[in-house]
Every structure is written in C-alpha cells, then in structure tokens.
Image (cartoon, grey):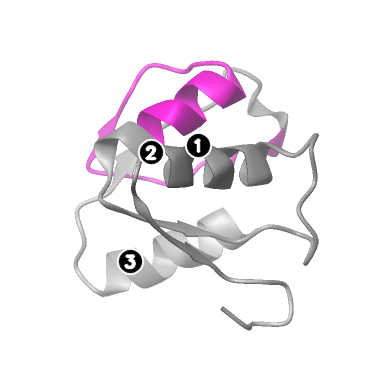
Amino acid sequence: GSDADFHDLARAAGATIIIHPPEDAKNRANCVGDSVLPAKPYLDRNKEIVNACTVLIATPDSVKEKVRSGTWSTIRYGRKAGRRVIVVLPDGSI
C-alpha cells in the first residue's frame, strides 16, 4: 500500500513518475505514470529502481531488517550502490 500512497503524494507534488512494474502482478499497485518500463522480476526491477535514483525512500513492513524481504534487499543494494537511503519505518520514524 505504501507504493500507491507515495505515488499519490508524488503525483500531487508534480513529480515525473516512471513505473517499474513487476512481472508478478499480484501485488502491483497499478498506478498511472508518465512512462511504464517493461515488467521484470521483483529483484531485477528493484535494482533498476536503485540504479535510476540518487535518493531511495523505502517503507519496509518491519523495524528489524529481514533477509528474505524484497524491500530490505533493495535497501541493502541501495546502500551498497552508494545511494542516499531514507528508511521510513512502520511507526513513521525515519
């Protein structure tokens, strides 16, 4: 749900939105963007998102880092890639 929520905030702020859809559409937010890239497996598209940004804002569903979590995997990759990573925890703390 946080992808769709953030999409709405970014759209309201006038941001350009590029959709990076996953191949597995069961959890897809189905938001409308300015452009849509080809669907990819989750981990591949998450790396693509990190590679395309300078700042990554992530909203994991847990306070503690999880090994088998796509969001936490993306956070780790973002840090390794030298991106500024902002983690917004479930309680709203950063």
**The N terminus: image quadrant:** bottom right
Q: Nearer the viewer, mark 3 or mark 2?
A: 2
Q: Is residue 18 left or right of residue 3?
A: left
User: Could you tell me residue 32's position as x and y percent?
Assistant: 37, 45
Amino acid tagged 2: Val
Disc 2, SS: helix
Image position of 72 with respect to 64: above or below: above
Q: In the rendering, at what x and y percent does residue 58 appear?
A: 53, 57
Q: In which image quadrant can residue 93 be found?
A: bottom right
The answer to whether residue 75 is left or right of residue 90 is left
Image vertical order of residue 50 relative to residue 61, above or below: above
Q: Tell me the residue at 73%/73% (across/down).
A: 90
Mark 3 element type:
helix
Q: Quadrant of residue 89?
A: bottom right
Q: Is residue 15 above or below residue 88?
A: above
Tag 1, which secondary structure?
A: helix
- Bin the neighbour count of mark 1 within 10 Å (Cα to Cα): few under 14, some 14-19, many 20 and up: some
Q: Give the class, few, some or many, for how many residues have Cα within 10 Å of label 2's Cα (few <14, many ≥20).
A: many
Residue indicated by mark 2:
50
| Label 3 or label 2, whichever comes before in sequence order | 3
Nearer to the camera, 54 or 40? 54
- The number of callouts visible is 3
Look at mark 1 in the image and give the residue it sits on: 77
Residues at marks 1 and 2 touching, judged by CB atoms closer than 8 Å: yes
Label 3 sits on what residue type? Answer: Ala
Q: Check residue 6 for magenta coloring.
A: no
Q: Find the magenta span and give its range.
A: 27-49
